[in-house]
Amino acid sequence: MAWVQVEQSMMTHRKTLDLADRLGISPVTARGHLVTLWAWGLDNAEIDGTILRATPGMIARAAEWPGDPAEFYEALRAAGYLDVEDDRVALHDWPDYAGKLAERRAANAKRMRQNRAKEKSEPDDCAAHVQRTSDARAGVTQPNLTLPYQEDVLVPPVAPQPVDNPTSSDENDGDEDDGYEEYRVRLGALLERQFGERPNRRALTMFATDLWNAGVELDLIEWGAKQAKMRGENPEAYFGGMVSRWLEQCVRTVAEAKAASEAHRSRAGPPRTRSGTTARGAR
């Protein structure tokens, strides 16, 4: 469970009192809006507190402010709880409030990096790895990534394959996350571009971790999203099924996906009518 740190000094801090005065509300009400905003930030702010594509309306809704969004936004900025520089909007001193969570996420990234380094020398036996990890992941609840603000749903477990991701290189070995954070951010932007909504941070992190560990290229995700949208009804569900099959079959590139689809069609044979006869033109 994620949480934010609220220090005793924040209760009557000059910035809190200033915020309350600017908005014409009590300090306890101001504290409530701040904590609500910070709790929202756990799933939506970047590690340094940056809020992507932030608007006054977004900030006000996140903090459950019932009044004028522009007034609330400006009051947060003037009181020092919101940093606004050029096009960047960030929660002030965010690591102080969510530091433990950031540390845990950094530790997880380090652990994934160590696991990849440990298993680089092992044979790339995807089927064996799926068998080895499927039992451990059975029954795990994973979020519905394309419906980001709904409850998590149970989906068939998938088995990530720890391999060196195609988007990373040896030159990144000294970086904190070996390129994972950039991969996660680009994945979120890709999903938002294709489906119109960006998954919340928790859902996106879980999805990105599976894809990153499996070595799935982002080009494949974008190709799959476009294919799913061409299917008409419920493209999100179709896309989710495609990704599950790719992870189970260790498909990592567009070329591998196309080859797998062609192999499936060859095994299935020509399409048939409801009566069981071969469809006209398929002979």
Image: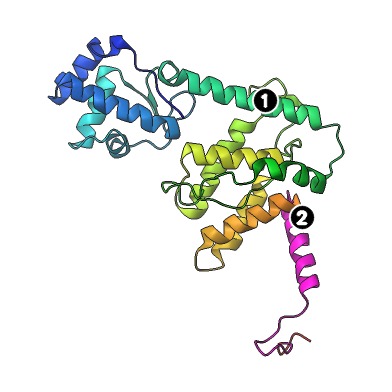
Q: Say what secondary structure mark 2 lies in.
A: helix
What segment carries the magenta color? 251-278
> Percent from the top left, x then y, of residue 107?
61, 22
Which of discs 1 and 2 lies nearer the camera? The answer is 1
Q: Is residue 5 left or right of residue 142?
A: left
- The correct choice, above or below, for 277 with respect to 54 in the image is below
Q: Is residue 12 visible?
A: yes
User: Is 259 contained in the magenta span?
Assistant: yes
- Give whichever of 146, 8 is nearer the camera: 8
**In the rendered view of the protein, which quadrant contains the C terminus?**
bottom right
Instruction: Tell me the residue at 23%/16% (across/down).
Output: 16
* Quarter of the rendering containing residue 33: top left
Instruction: Tell me the residue at 57%/39% (across/down).
Output: 206
Instruction: Tell me the residue at 75%/31% (across/down).
Output: 116
> Percent from the top left, x then y, of residue 149?
41, 46
Q: Say what secondary structure mark 1 lies in.
A: helix
Q: Is residue 216 visible?
A: no
What distance separates the C-alpha of mark 1 from that of mark 2? 28 Å
> Percent from the top left, x then y, of residue 222?
61, 52
- Give whichever of 173, 88 is nearer the camera: 173
User: Is 254 contained in the magenta span?
Assistant: yes
Q: Is residue 281 left or right of residue 151?
A: right
Given the image, on which type of amino acid does mark 2 rest?
Glu
Structural crowding at the residue carrying mark 1, measured as other residues with C-alpha within 10 Å and reported as few (<14), some (14–19) or many (≥20): few
Which residue has dot 1 on it? 111
Q: Is residue 80 left or right of residue 232?
A: left
Instruction: Tell me the residue at 71%/90% (across/down).
Output: 280
* Quarter of the rendering containing residue 228: bottom right
Structural crowding at the residue carrying mark 2, measured as other residues with C-alpha within 10 Å and reported as few (<14), some (14–19) or many (≥20): some
Q: Which mark is residue 54?
A: none
